[in-house]
């Protein structure tokens, strides 16, 4: 009888934790992940000799240029402008110092001239609009900074069209974690019960 009670406790804890893990993950709202790639390239038609060693320093200059692009899309004022042009309000829970985290920015693992800018939202349409707005703003801002000699005129950017995908819910992993957690919790209860006798 004692062993049956212990098995019952283990099964009950396992089922409850499994159900909780499954429900928690499956009830999450749909999330869409979108990204664009930003590539830096050199204007070969430009005969300006400002960069005499441009070929030698191309990797360094590309990385510095990508850092400048990151600064543009991390500015809270710029982020607000990007969202305003889509007629979409920023999430109310976001504070002004969190605006710089709205877009995720990652350079290519091998360095070079490419970075990935990504954005997540619960609507596919909104995710696409925000990324397109960000691309348009970035092109205009880069042109403006080049005109004002804040960025080198020899370098240009190319931004890909947004790719937006529905993120898969990790129901299997959450369920497995629930089962394992339930077993551990059940074992602890059984051990405590036996020890308390």
Image: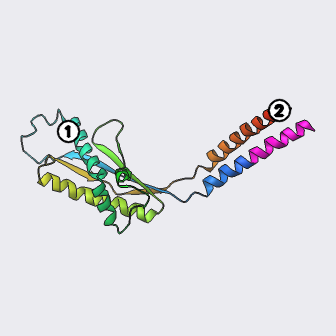
Residue found at the far top of this picture: 195
Q: Main secondary structure of the magenta part?
A: helix
* Disc number placed over residue 61 in the picture, else none: 1
Residue found at the far front of this picture: 196
Q: Which x, y percent locates residue 36?
A: 35, 53
Q: Which x, y percent locates residue 66?
A: 26, 44
Pointer 2 residue: 196
Q: Residue at x 14, y 37 (%)?
A: 54
Q: Which marked residue is nearer to the observer: mark 2 or mark 1?
A: 2
Whole-number angstrom distance, CA of label 2 to CA of label 1: 69 Å
Identify whether 154 is placed above or below 136.
Answer: above
Q: What range is drawn magenta here?
A: 1-15
Q: Residue at x 41, y 56 (%)?
A: 94
Identify whether 46 is placed above or below 86.
Answer: above
167 left or right of 179?
Answer: left
> In front here: 26 or 189?
189
Q: Residue at x 14, y 46 (%)?
A: 152
> In front here: 48 or 127?
127
Say whether disc 2 or disc 1 marks the residue closer to the N-terminus. 1
Q: Quadrant of residue 42?
A: top left
In which quadrant will I find the N terminus? top right
State if disc 1 and disc 2 touch (CB < 8 Å): no
* Disc number placed over residue 133 in the picture, else none: none
Residue found at the far bottom of this picture: 87
Assess disc 2: are there few (<14), some (14-19) or many (≥20) residues with their C-alpha within 10 Å of its C-alpha. few
């Amino acid at each position: 009888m004692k062993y049956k009670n212990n098995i019952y406790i283990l099964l009950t804890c396992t089922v409850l934790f499994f159900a909780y893990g499954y429900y928690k993950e499956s009830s999450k709202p749909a999330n869409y992940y979108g990204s664009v790639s930003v590539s830096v390239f050199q204007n070969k038609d430009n005969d300006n000799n400002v960069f005499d060693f441009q070929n030698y320093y191309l990797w360094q200059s590309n990385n510095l240029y990508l850092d400048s692009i990151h600064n543009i899309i991390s500015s809270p004022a710029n982020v607000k402008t990007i969202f305003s042009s889509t007629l979409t309000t920023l999430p109310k829970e976001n504070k002004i110092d969190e605006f710089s985290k709205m877009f995720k920015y990652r350079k290519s693992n091998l360095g070079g001239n490419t970075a990935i800018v990504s954005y997540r939202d619960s609507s596919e349409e909104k995710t696409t609009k925000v990324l397109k707005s960000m691309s348009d703003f970035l092109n205009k801002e880069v042109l403006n900074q080049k005109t004002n000699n804040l960025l080198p005129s020899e370098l240009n950017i190319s931004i890909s069209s947004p790719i937006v995908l529905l993120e898969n819910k990790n129901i299997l992993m959450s369920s497995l974690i629930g089962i394992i957690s339930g077993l551990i919790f059940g074992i602890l209860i059984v051990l405590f019960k036996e020890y308390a006798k």
